[in-house]
Image: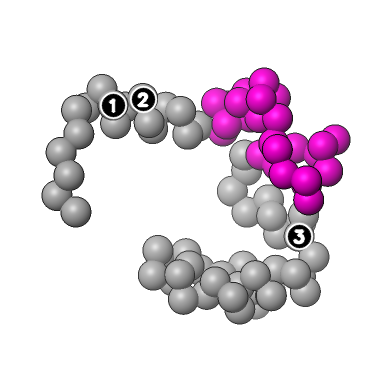
Amino acid sequence: LQIDRPNDLLVRAIEGCTFDQMRRREDEFGWHNVRWPPEKHFVRRGKIGSYRSEIPIGLLRVFEDESKECLEALGYATAYENSVNEG
């Protein structure tokens, strides 16, 4: 894209995307989505791969079927493929 941005702006953007900062913002401002239960955190645990124990495999397969091309373009392996390779 060749877009120049000041380093301090990039550093603030990166620091604002840490798990702690995202959870703090969710606690402070809420997660305003009528389809998300207000008693549950959307920003969950901040642990790599934790979704494997949180999302039913059927739902995960639907998500991956719909987003596989995008996930692969961004360098992500699908969870289903990981679980097959690890099993």
Mark 3 vs 1: CB contact within 8 A: no
Residue under label 3: 55
Which residue is depicted at the point 29% across and 31% down? 10
Crowding at label 1, few (<14), some or many (≥20) Cα neighbours within 10 Å? few
Q: Quadrant of the N terminus?
A: bottom left
* Left or right placement of residue 68 versus residue 54 in this view: left
Q: Is residue 30 magenta?
A: yes
Kind of residue at disc 1: Leu
* Left or right placement of residue 26 versus residue 9 in this view: right
In this view of the protein, can residue 39 be seen by the observer?
A: yes
Distance between the Cα atoms at labels 3 and 1? 35 Å
Q: Earlier in the sequence, mark 3 or mark 1?
A: 1
Kind of residue at disc 3: Ile
Quadrant for residue 62, please give it.
bottom right
Residue 31 % position (x, y):
69, 36
Kind of residue at disc 2: Arg
The part of the chain drawn in magenta is: 19-43
Q: Quadrant of the C terminus?
A: bottom right
**Secondary structure type for disc 1:** helix
Residue under label 2: 12
Q: Earlier in the sequence, mark 2 or mark 3?
A: 2
